[in-house]
Image: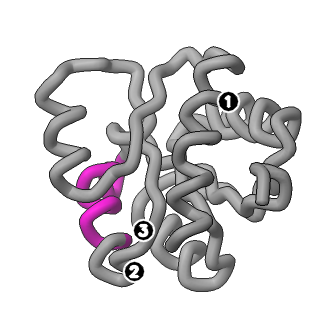
Amino acid sequence: MDNAGKRVLIVDDSSFMRQSLKAIMEKLGYTVVGTAENGVDALAKYRDLKPDIVTLDIIMPQMGGLQGLKLLRSVDPNAVVVMVSSMADKESVVECAKAGAKHYLLKPFDETKVGEVMKRVAADAQSA
């Protein structure tokens, strides 16, 4: 199975970033089943929407991405999560990987890079 039809939940506190990533995902053939603006909202929507892949911003109010990632993985150990950030510091990347993130996307979004990362994680979502 290819990427088409993979269901994605986009989590970012910035409306602009959610819309930007949604447009790229849809262009790449993914189905965006929902968006959320923080980790609390993301957890509720994850349970309801059961997406194949979640993109999760690291810096958000109420509940940040790392805490959200840990909670998502406790609810579903097979959750396929791609962390999103405007900062590429190695410490954050390592911390997110240890917590179970499958990959990392940097803002501003580059369509080619998003496509490469999503293709990799879509294979993980398939086997989950």
* 116 horizontally vs 93: left or right: right
Are there few (<14), some (14-19), or many (20+) residues within 10 Å of tag 3? Answer: some
Mark 1 element type: helix
Residue 108 in picture, x, y percent from top left: 56, 15
User: What distance separates the C-alpha of mark 1 from that of mark 2?
Assistant: 25 Å
Residue 41, how many percent across, how many down?
A: 51, 67
* Amino acid residing under circle 2: Asp
Marked residue nearer the N-terminal end (3 or 1): 3
Q: Is residue 2 left or right of residue 87?
A: right
Above or below, 37 against 89 in this view is below
- On screen, residue 64 versus residue 54, left or right, reads left
Q: Secondary structure at mark 2?
A: loop
Hey, what amino acid is under mark 1? Answer: Gly
* Residue at 64% in and 69% down: 51
In the rendered image, which residue does mark 3 sit on? 40
Q: Quadrant of the N terminus?
A: bottom right
The boundaries of the magenta stretch are 61-72
| Distance Cα–Cα, label 3 vs label 1 | 27 Å
On whether residue 5 falls in the magenta region, the answer is no
Task: Please say if 93 is above or below 51.
Answer: above
The image position of residue 87, as x and y in percent, is 31, 19
**Residue placed most toward the observer, 103 or 9:** 103
In front of the other: label 1 or label 2?
1
**Labelled disc at residue 115:** 1
Name above or below for residue 106 compared with residue 8: above
Q: Residue at x 73, y 62 (%)?
A: 7
Provide the residue designation for mark 2. 76
The stretch drawn in magenta includes residue 69: yes
Amino acid carrying label 3: it is Val
Q: Secondary structure at mark 3?
A: helix
